[in-house]
Image: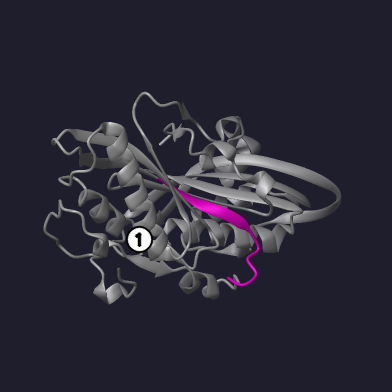
Amino acid sequence: MVSDLNDSFLGKKLPIVENYDPFLLFKIPRSINREKYNISSENLPFVGADVWNCYEVSFLTKNGLPISRVMKLIYSANSIYLVESKSLKLYLNSFNMEKFGETVEESEEMVTERIKNDLSNLIGEEVTIALFSAKDKAVKPFSAFYSYDLLQFIPSEKLANLHFDCFNENPNLLRSQLTETIQEYVFYSDVLRSNCPVTHQPDWGDVFVKMTTKHEIDFSSILQYLVSFRKEAHFHEEIVEIIYKRFLEHFQPEKLMVCAMYTRRGGIDINPIRASENSLLNEDLLSTQYRIERNFR
């Protein structure tokens, strides 16, 4: 298991590995991005987790029967490291021709435990793993948020006159007016695009925000700010933490939750959530009882 980018498989052409190999896994220190944005790992301004859906998980029983599952992977935002997604894909592929257990149930238990142990050892934090089949119940986190599309809060005339010419993250775009009244904001937007810092391929995400603040927010400025990520190169987890930190600084909220559910790429999607308190974390997203139903993307 490696953590130096120069020693990783990122950006390199690799042979197909179909036999179990935990050394394919690669970790990245969260501190690299957090230090840049003045987020102290010793005193995090949020609680949260990274929730992954891995759609290409397969292995064999002892008699060679293939088992295909969707895996939900959850670990805390408190972890020192995050898992690099390409390395996880390669690692999961290494289970494809491995045999586990006499029965389907026994095989699932063995694979779940193996993956849990490998990933927990990699990042130094307990990792939760759940495997799902098509018969298992699926839920859509933040389903109520889709009624609060950010665009609907911006008058059409104002939207038509907005200029979107900043495509690198710029917190100076955020505008609001401090008032004496506490207001609660709930909204969603599908305009988020950022880029992988390694491959520079685009990443598409739906953003969900819940915030309680005395600031009267200019929604058009939120839209312009989200658009400003369009040429940014960050991992998904970093994008959510940047947005959270900027909102925290500018709007001084009493309560804040930011989540981005990203589009599947390479058979994996990553859904980081950060909040000012545990009660704001989405239970369906973090539950190991349900697989996640696909969102708009």
Decide if residue 193 is on the left or right side of residue 56.
right
Task: Name the one closer to the observer, 166 or 163.
Answer: 166
Tally of numbered discs: 1
Q: Position of residue 245 (x, y in %)?
A: 62, 62
Residue to which mark 1 is pinned: 84
| 176 or 244: nearer the viewer | 244
Camera-nearest residue between 102 and 108: 102
Question: Residue at 27% across / 32% down in the picture?
Answer: 104
> Counting other residues with Cα less than 10 Å from the Cα at mark 1, is it few (<14), some (14-19), or many (20 or more)?
some
Q: Residue at x 30, y 73 (%)?
A: 5
Residue type at the position of mark 1: Glu
- Mark 1 secondary-structure assignment: loop
Residues shaded magenta: 41-52
Classify residue 281 by image quadrant. top right
Query: In the rendered view, would you say 195 is above or below 36?
Result: above
- Residue at image location 68% in from the left, 54% down from the top: 276
* Foreground pick, 208 / 52: 52
- Residue 214 lies, in percent from the top left, at 81, 52
Residue 15 x, y percent position in the rendering: 11, 58
Residue 194, image quadrant: bottom left
